[in-house]
Amino acid sequence: MDEFGFIAKYLSALAGPEGLDLKDDVAVWKAPKGLEVVISMDTQVEGVHFPDGKFDAQTAEKLISVNISDLVSKGADPIGYFLSLTLSEHVDVEALEIFCRGLANAQNRYGIKLWGGDTTRTKGKNVLTVTLVGTVPVGKTVLRSGAQVGDLVCVTGCIGDSYLGLKTVLNQMDKFGSQSSYWESAYHLPEPPFALRQAIRKYATAALDISDGLLADAGHIADVSGVGIDIFLTTIPLSTASTKWVLGECDHQKARVKLATGGDDYQVLMCVPEQKISALKKQATKTGIALTVIGKITDGSGVKCRDSQGNEVKIDKPGYTHF
Amino acid sequence: MDEFGFIAKYLSALAGPEGLDLKDDVAVWKAPKGLEVVISMDTQVEGVHFPDGKFDAQTAEKLISVNISDLVSKGADPIGYFLSLTLSEHVDVEALEIFCRGLANAQNRYGIKLWGGDTTRTKGKNVLTVTLVGTVPVGKTVLRSGAQVGDLVCVTGCIGDSYLGLKTVLNQMDKFGSQSSYWESAYHLPEPPFALRQAIRKYATAALDISDGLLADAGHIADVSGVGIDIFLTTIPLSTASTKWVLGECDHQKARVKLATGGDDYQVLMCVPEQKISALKKQATKTGIALTVIGKITDGSGVKCRDSQGNEVKIDKPGYTHF
């Protein structure tokens, strides 16, 4: 099957009208009045962001979810995406069909359509890139730069499951039975808090999604907003499985730091004025998304991770860099 | 140098205000009234679209130019782009600096700015993806689908230089002295007819850029527009260097077919009503861009390549597929 046959058979079925049935080189879109356009681009590399040899429906869903995560954290409504598939010779037509089923699942979940892209081959490893387009009412995009001294710092979902999932996938964990498959699933299928995006743009002063590690990403907000952030380590929300893991480790604090710096969580870290917290929490409850206050914005600089006594916990490496 | 250091040092200098100094995960842009948004995505792979080991200013300029080519052929004005760099371990900071100089050159030439992207590493080959955003007055985007029976088919620039350039780079050509470096340069630094984009949207009924090969790309217009296209082989414009090469080959016709199917030209193939040709030609002359009529739209289907007597020339493979 050649490029055009593949596009015609599998990808065209995923296209929205803006994608012109993928029969042109471009997408054409009239941005609705009163909205600003928010665009992210995220690349996933075989052997870096997903295991060598893995190319299935989960790979597709994760690729879409990590981009959705970017837009959700900005309070944006995603609408369409561009997909660049650079595929190794190991990817055959059967694998592509399964991959496209994952794309279809993700499209349905997030209400987006394929608008265009490119398909190429490489003698190297698979490289998958998505550019995701969304909208926000003008002036309402939540940036990293808006944090105010006194804001509370909240996080959605649980932190660290994906880190333990990666360690499980890499066979760096002892056997944990059902916990292992829970962590693996968190790693392969991150679930950004999609249903909370409109509340985020209503209540948050600054936000981002956690990909490098909670403490590293908090640092990005601190830097760009020109504020300090205190994070209270023991308040960071953990799943039952990960709490069990922490309690099984010799050094509980060190274990918690690992989860707070492991990354790949694709949850949203946001800063919210204290008087708006209860309204935001109500929305979170309504949408079934956990929301936890884990710190506050200070007039200092950088991130300080503190134990339950308020003492600073020394952090060697606050997160992962892909480069 | 880590990801953030690289972004801060080299890429931030290339960013437009929509890119938020590359300090956020997204770009934010308010699309101007009365315009529709046109977006393309194009990927270049080491060892496929550019030679193994090549990563320099030309690589950057070509990456931008092939995307500019897509938008120019639609009559769009490019404004901003997203860049995904997935780099092998062979790319060091010095190479990155040189690559970024190429980006800066291309940005200046086309009046665009960097809006965002992603930088990642791979154990495989370099994969470079650009998503380019442009605008067109509402309803004026030139698609592949608008060709009308009776339209003349025109092409900008010269065809086939890049094909001979690739053969030169791959050491598949005998020595041709200065011709070789001319062809190589055409391959490494394609020059889409940027200055003609507004005339294209004013006069063309259908258009695309030539990447797979002139005859293959003409076939895309024929298919999507539901028309036939006659292309007259000997009218296809060739450079002096490529004309010399044709005349040196035993079978002149076969040589011309190679140039018309080689691809990578990044010139624009467009369909224009006969009564508008002279106005379009005037614009082409004004902007210093060669424009040649090479065929016409018929009420048949598919592309027929004809010799100077009007007899059909059999084509085995009308173009390249990357997949």
Image (tube, coloured by chain):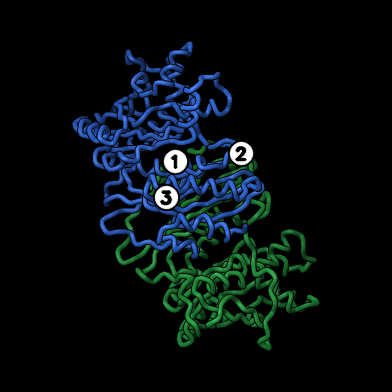
Chain colours: A blue, B green
- Could you tell whether A228 is left or right of A262 in the image? left
Distance CA(mark 3)–CA(mark 2): 25 Å
Of the two numbered discs 1 and 2 on the same chain, state the one appearing first in sequence.
Answer: 2
- Could you tell whether A199 is left or right of A104 in the image? left
What chain letter is assigned to the residue under label 1? A
What chain letter is assigned to the residue under label 3? A
Sort mark 2 into few (<14), some (14-19) or many (20+) by Cα contacts within 10 Å. Answer: few
Sort mark 3 into few (<14), some (14-19) or many (20+) by Cα contacts within 10 Å. Answer: many
The residue singled out by tag 3 in the image is: A132
Instruction: Establish if A166 lies above or below B301.
Output: above
Of the two numbered discs 1 and 3 on the same chain, state the one appearing first in sequence.
Answer: 1
Q: For the point 24% across and 29% down, which residue is it?
A: A150
Q: For the point 20% across and 30% down, which residue is it?
A: A278
- Could you tell whether A290 is left or right of B97 in the image? left
Where is residue B139 drawn, in percent x and y? 36, 70
Residue type at numbered disc 3: Leu
As drawn, the label of residue A66 is: 1
Distance CA(mark 1)–CA(mark 3): 10 Å
Sort mark 1 into few (<14), some (14-19) or many (20+) by Cα contacts within 10 Å. Answer: many
